[in-house]
Amino acid sequence: MDKVIIELKNITKIFDGERIVDDINLSIYENEFITLLGPSGCGKTTTLRMLGGFITPDQGQIILDNKIVNDLPPYARPLNTVFQRYALFPHLNVFDNIAFGLANKPYKLKVAHFGLENLQNAARAYYNIPTSKKVNVFQMESTISRRIAEEVNRLLKLVNLVGFEKRKVAEMSGGQQQRVAIARALINRPRILLLDEPLAALDLKLRHNMQYELKEMQKTLGITFVFVTHDQEEAMTMSDRIVVMNNGKIVQMGIPKFIYNEPVNRYVANFIGESNIVEGVYVAEDKVKFMDQTFDVVGYKFEIGEKVDVVIRPEDFDVVALNKAKLVGTITSSIFKGVYNELLIDIKGREFVAHSFEHIEIGGKVGLKVDPYEIHLMKVEKNNEHAEQ
């Protein structure tokens, strides 16, 4: 995954005087699953639509395979898009919906898609045409139709819709319609597939199932997926890399584990999972003080006496006996989450969230400690550009 297939260089888009996308630089690699993640209005969908050719950037360059494509229309780019609203044709059945884009291409483009020599050889074999005779247009068209049918059947198998060929799309569930939309996009053999929140309309269980199915499809097909979502769990589950966006800018990018464990600021820490964030002071090498207690930390270098933001994930707190605790508080809420109890704990007037496998009654005292490698430190930002919303 080291060949760059897409480059966005200093991409900016302005609507009504507002910078919706603000000087973005991003390289996307061949065969990777990359996710643009952020809240509504952060610029992720606008970025995807510029990449797809539906919007032209005001500044910067979009480069595909080392060629600037700013002015190329969507159909001239080696990509296809699956939108949140699948835009299927209700009057066509599943087979015809999937085949539509390829079947309605001009004859020359269909020949180019399958390859002239391959089509001619297939026609000669099917019609038993000797090499001394030419393959006529009727025979070529018929061969193309058979090849399209083969492609549709291959994709029906890929998206688990074998047997649904004649079904009207209006008679299908949301998850089935989504599969049809993906197959319709894939029949053109794009090198890049753009997906704009395609799971948003599905119920929770189906959405989880489709997350795994999409990831498996991407591995099977070996093409680049650029996925847009506001759902951090979705991004963590599916992505090779996550690009976290806010206010039209890229805030942080990296593999999911790195983004989760090493957020660069409060915005990322809060957006990617739950976090306890508290002000602290780096009091000595590998030591930080917060909530009037000094804790050991690992792997951070700050100036002695420098203020820092301390991040502890709820699952990283250990609930311990009061005499072994570094922090002691009162339970204000306890919610059973299936595997663990989510505890809200008041410690000196400040609310913390911790996960515990044991049930503790509301109003009860609880002790907490945390291992040094579970404490994450961040520089305190001098402005609130990416502060917690």
Image (tube, rainbow, N blue to C red):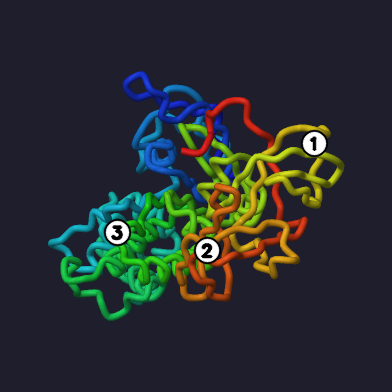
**Residue that numbered label 1 is attached to:** 302
**257 displayed left or right of 272:** right
Looking at the image, the residue that sits furthest to the bottom is: 163
**Which mark lies nearer to you, 2 or 1?**
2
Q: Is residue 92 above or below residue 68?
A: below
- Of the two numbered discs 2 and 3 on the same chain, state the one appearing first in sequence: 3
Secondary structure of the residue carrying numbered label 3: loop
- Of the two numbered discs 2 and 1 on the same chain, state the one appearing first in sequence: 1
Cα–Cα gap, marks 2 and 1 = 32 Å
**Residue that numbered label 3 is attached to:** 201
Q: Amino acid at mark 1?
A: Phe
Q: Position of residue 244 (x, y in %)?
A: 53, 43
Q: Amino acid at mark 2?
A: Leu
Cα–Cα gap, marks 2 and 3 = 31 Å
Q: Amino acid at mark 3?
A: Ala
Looking at the image, the residue that sits furthest to the left is: 91
Q: Position of residue 327 (x, y in %)?
A: 68, 56
Quarter of the image where the N terminus is located: bottom right
Q: Is residue 212 visible?
A: yes
Please tell me how many numbered marks the rendered image carries.
3
**Residue 148 quadrant:** bottom left
**Numbered tag placed on residue 343 in the rendering:** 2
Q: Which residue: 35% across, 50% down?
A: 109
Q: Is residue 361 above or below residue 45?
A: below
Secondary structure of the residue carrying numbered label 1: loop
Secondary structure of the residue carrying numbered label 2: strand
